[in-house]
Amino acid sequence: MVRAKDLVASSFSQVFVLHLVLLLISFSFLLILSAPLVYMYLNIFKMNFAKADTWVNDVLYFVEIFIKVLAFYMTLPVVAASVAYLYYSLSEIMEASHLRQAIDSFGSSLKSKFARR
């Protein structure tokens, strides 16, 4: 937790902009989802059944709620993945462990090439 706090403190603007972009993306996606488009499609589907069929209304109500909940929970992995990507990219910027390992392996391969000559 302390390490994450240090990483966030080092580049607060990147973290803030990432969360702002994620908020806008999820808000626009959920706004489109709750648009009347889904409601219109379900009403067209409902018109094909008799009004006396109460089970159809219950099923369609369940389908409408299921679509909205499923779509909302599809945005959560995007948020989690982007936060994880930000954490690992900030840790790589601060520590550069992979870069150091790549430089060491490149340097050792150059030493072995020049040693053969």
Image (cartoon, grey):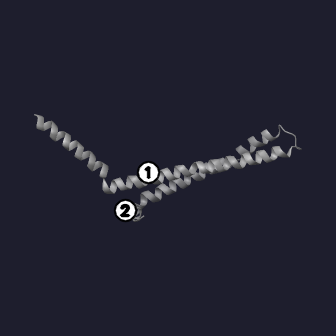
Across and down, in percent, residue 52 comes to 89, 44
Q: Which picture quadrant has residue 44?
A: top right
Left or right: 51 in relation to 33? right
Mark-to-mark CA distance, 2 and 1 = 16 Å
The local secondary structure at tag 1 comes to helix
Instruction: Please give the name of the residue rendered at 24% of the width and 46% of the height, measured from the top-left corner.
Output: 103
Left or right: 24 in relation to 105? right
Q: Nearer the viewer, residue 10 or 54?
A: 54
Q: Which picture quadrant has residue 93?
A: bottom left
Residue 15's place in the image compared with 61, above or below, is below
Residue 10: which disc? Answer: 2
The image quadrant where one finds the N terminus is: bottom left
Residue 112's place in the image compared with 26, above or below, is above
Q: Which badge, 2 or 1, is on the more N-terminal residue?
A: 2
Q: Residue furthest right?
A: 52
The 10 Å Cα crowd at callout 1, few under 14, some 14 to 19, many 20 or more, is few
Q: Residue furthest left?
A: 117
Residue 85: which disc? Answer: 1
Across and down, in percent, residue 23 comes to 55, 55
Disc tally is: 2
The image quadrant where one finds the C terminus is: top left
Left or right: 18 in relation to 63? left
Across and down, in percent, residue 96 comes to 30, 53
Left or right: 31 in relation to 90? right
Instruction: Please give the name of the residue rendered at 74% of the width and 48% of the height, measured from the top-left corner.
Output: 62
- Amino acid type, callout 1: Tyr
Instruction: Please give the name of the residue rendered at 34% of the width and 53% of the height, measured from the top-left corner.
Output: 92
In this rendering, which labeled residue sits more in front, label 2 or label 1? 1
Across and down, in percent, residue 19 comes to 50, 57
- Amino acid type, callout 2: Ser
The local secondary structure at tag 2 comes to helix
